[in-house]
Amino acid sequence: MTLPRSRTLVVSFTSLPLLAMKITSSILASVAFAAVVSAQESAPVKAADPKDSKVLELDAYVVTDRQDSAYKSATAITGTKTDTPLINIPQNIQVITREMIEDMGATDITDLYPLMGSVTEFSYGGVSARGFRQEQTRYNGIAGSPYNEFGVLTLDNVQQVELLKGPVGLLYGDNEPGGLINIVTARPRAERSASIGTRFGDYGLLGANASVTGPIDAKKRFLYLASANYYERDSFRANYHQESTNVNGSFTWVITPETRATVGVEYIKNDQSGARLRGVPFLATGFATDISFNGAEPTDYQNLDTTVYSFQLDHTFSRQLRVNAYARYFQSDADQAYHETNTFNPTTGLWPREFRIQNRHMEEYSWAVNAVADLQFLGAKHKVLTGVENSYANRVFTTKTIPQAQVTAINVYHPVYGLSSGLMYNTSLVGIVPTDTEKIRLGFYLQDQINIREKVHLLAGLRLEKYDDSRSRPTVDQFDDSVLTYRAGAVYMIRPNIAAFLSYAMGLVPQSLGSEDRNGPFPPQESHSWEGGFKFDLFNKRLGITTTTYKIMKTNILERDPTPGAPSTWLAPIGDITSKGFEFDATGQLTKNLSLSATYAYNTAMVTRSVLAATPVGSRFPNAPRNKAGFFMRYNLPQYKLGFGLGGSYVGQRPNFSGAANFPGPAYHVYNGSIFYRWKELRFTLRCENLLDKVYAKSVFTSDGHFPGNPRTFTGTASYRF
């Protein structure tokens, strides 16, 4: 059926031709608006004028390369989509630079979670951010994760990782209010460099990588980047083996001093046997068996194959006006065949299983166009951003389940593998009707950053978000709506290096199509957030410190309709959630040889309005600890060509995923150590994860099982840069 609109603000768009016309007109309107408002201040571009050289080389927009120290970035373009220093943004934004990623020995996104404030690991790379489950990741500011639904992002082609905390509805629309992770990928550089390396370690880890970038011609008008990464390893979990391949190529054409275009392609292949990994059974006393236990068989697998294409265009019209456009498309296939465990019997040790065969085919394209105008009027400087972004995602999900009555259960206390296998069942998906869904997001936004005498920085903006969710198989359903969101904030510079800030932001998350199916339409989930704090740039801007307090209120949570006589399947938007907390983040250099990053977060996220007995008022969220802390530091001894790294994290007790009071995730603390050695252009690193060999649950899952963290693990790397 087709559901009626709710809270409609603009004319519905349901046909693709009409959508294409609106998109095209929106792009033209965005550029035209910025051109008009800047006309009175704009000056002709003169290539020979040294005052304009910075603009002509487009440095004003390529801000993610700017750093105050190895660990401290000066800017994060995700925060405002403009080249604004972090200290002037009324929001807590963390940046993890490439140098920090390499020093930590991070290979995937989960390795960085200890340094991400109020972020804790959920499952399969997802997180809990300020108490809210968040599974959406942006790439260079636009939507679409090429790792499908259960893949974990690797860091092979990543320049830096940015964490925006709190609602981000103004610039990014549909998103949970806890925050947003943005991945900034590497781009070709004008200076030639190359590296080769190898990786080795426990559990049969073996890998190699190579990258090269630089100009093709003497005038540096054509730049390239090529990289390849491969590794394979076993795991402390039985039956599990992983092979990962990542190949990247990108090319930049400096068309004119004012215009630059970059195209790129990325290939991702990740094969995992003995997967999909689930948790290890957990009791009130801890793990029920050794953490090496795996409910999957050796013949189970989870394989991912993705190809990503991207395009970016930067153009400077004048010293006052520039435009940035980015487009991205990927196609991804994830094939899985695995044993899914059900309810564990701690007395007998038996864990019943069913067998699932699944294919997830995804296609997604996203694009965004931004125009930025630097103006001056009414006695203040204005940085006006106007833009439009669009994303379209098609997901085709095909699945078949062999019921547990036909599948041999596994004994957790004495596991015997090989008694069940996908080879024993009819696993053909021929004739299975898939679930075919589409998701369209279209946003128009306007933002003004006002600088008053370098002491007061104001920010205000509006966004109109349009969304359309539909399903064509196995049943036909469709829902669309429009919502207006807004954001405002202020920064007061107490001193040139000390700022106080306060902000208010609104966010939204549309209700699921399955919920709308029942007795919708429903208004989207809305979030309203207040955030305030202080920012410090110390030691000649080498060290940045941010302290933040916040309160987020999320409304319109769907629950069973309590109206007398209402059908049992009916829903009502009556649930509320409130998240409060405090954050402290410090990143940079204390001395010439000592670099560090440290974070502490306190959070209480709980249900504040509910009629459900299963989630009463006061219920806390899964994988959301009250206290979390993390740090990493590196100290260099240049006279000996040595460096030493030490990191650690503390995560407090976390409620269970299913709400079972007797199976929470216990608090834990782990430490990691590193030794670095450099001889000329050769670099060697030896790392030890979990120095004290702690047994701990890194992520809470169900009342049956939690995900264990790695035991003590040694890895080494060697690289040569030239």
Image (cartoon, rainbow, N blue to C red):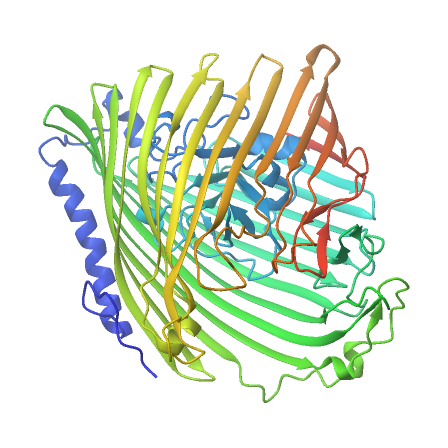
Which image quarter holds the C terminus? top right
Residue 372 visible here: no
Residue 418 x %, y %: 87, 72
Which image quarter holds the N terminus? bottom left
At horizontal 72% and vertical 44% (from top left) the residue drawn is 208
Residue 15 visible here: yes
In the rendered view, would you say 582 is above or below 260?
Answer: above
**Residue at far bottom of view:** 431
Residue 563 x %, y %: 36, 73
Q: Quadrant of residue 441?
A: bottom left
In the rendered view, would you say 699 is above or below 372?
Answer: below
**Residue at far top of view:** 639
In the rendered view, would you say 289 is above or below 54?
Answer: below
The number of numbered discs placed on residues in the rendered structure image is 0
In the rendered view, would you say 174 is above or below 714?
Answer: below
- Residue placed most toward the observer, 394 or 308: 394
Residue 24 x %, y %: 23, 60
Q: Quadrant of residue 279?
A: bottom right
- Residue placed most toward the observer, 31 or 524: 524
Residue 138 x %, y %: 45, 50
Q: Is residue 484 left or right of residue 44?
A: right
- Residue placed most toward the observer, 175 or 575: 575
**Residue at far front of view:** 564
At horizontal 52% and vertical 64% (from top left) the residue drawn is 613
Q: Is residue 256 left or right of residue 548?
A: left
At horizontal 26% and vertical 62% (from top left) the residue drawn is 482
At horizontal 59% and vertical 43% (from top left) the residue drawn is 625
